[in-house]
Image: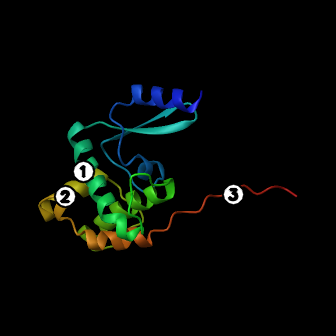
Amino acid sequence: MDERQYRNTYNNINPQRCVFEKAINSRVCNCNRSQRFNLADREGVACKSESALKRCDRLLQTLHENARFALHRIDINQLGHAQEIKIQNGGLLGLQTELENTKNEIVLDIDTVVKKAENQYGSIEKFPYSKIMQVISTYQIRAKKTKRRKS
């Protein structure tokens, strides 16, 4: 299956793609609104809630806008995989840290964290982005495990 055919099939079977798919597939974050599926040899993530998807999309857009300085980028529309992971994982971990006043290595439920933050801060636009950006800028992506060859 070529990449274009894969993308077309993916979009047909997953009309509500989770915007935090990279964070969920990295196993750092999870969400009660997500549903995993496999297509060919890849794993995808769908959102089971249209309202949650809209809320998360707004959050991710706002994280991108605020991350320009943290990532030393003017244009954040064409980010590489590693920088997108920094924004998604670092952003969600940073938000969770601000809510719970404790640093965790994983986000158990994105939907709960975002709802809790909206209740505490009033709206996504009022989240403590200066603190969240500190976590994004220092977030370290896990190194890939390499297979050792037998000598």
Residue 144 rendering spot, x and y as whole percentages: 61, 58
110 over 102 or under it: above or below: above
Q: Residue at left 35%, top 55%?
A: 108
Q: Distance between the residues labelled 2 and 1?
A: 8 Å
Q: Do the residues labelled 2 and 1 touch (CB within 8 Å)?
A: yes
- Secondary structure beneath disc 2? helix
- Secondary structure beneath disc 3? loop
Q: Distance between the residues labelled 1 and 3?
A: 36 Å
Provide the residue designation for mark 3. 146
The earlier-in-sequence mark between 2 and 1 is 1
94 over 23 or under it: above or below: below
- The amino acid type, in three-letter code, at marker 2 is Ile
Q: Do the residues labelled 1 and 3 touch (CB within 8 Å)?
A: no
Q: Which residue lies furthest to the right in this view?
A: 151
- Secondary structure beneath disc 1? helix
Q: Which residue lies furthest to the front in this view?
A: 74
Provide the residue designation for mark 1. 58
Query: How many neighbours does mark 2 have within 10 angstroms: few (below 14), some (14-19), or many (20 or more)?
Result: many
Q: Quadrant of the C terminus?
A: bottom right
Residue 65 rendering spot, x and y as whole percentages: 30, 60
Nearest to the observer: residue 127 or residue 115: 127
Q: Residue at left 45%, top 38%?
A: 44
Provide the residue designation for mark 2. 124
Residue 40 rendering spot, x and y as whole percentages: 56, 30
- The amino acid type, in three-letter code, at marker 1 is Arg
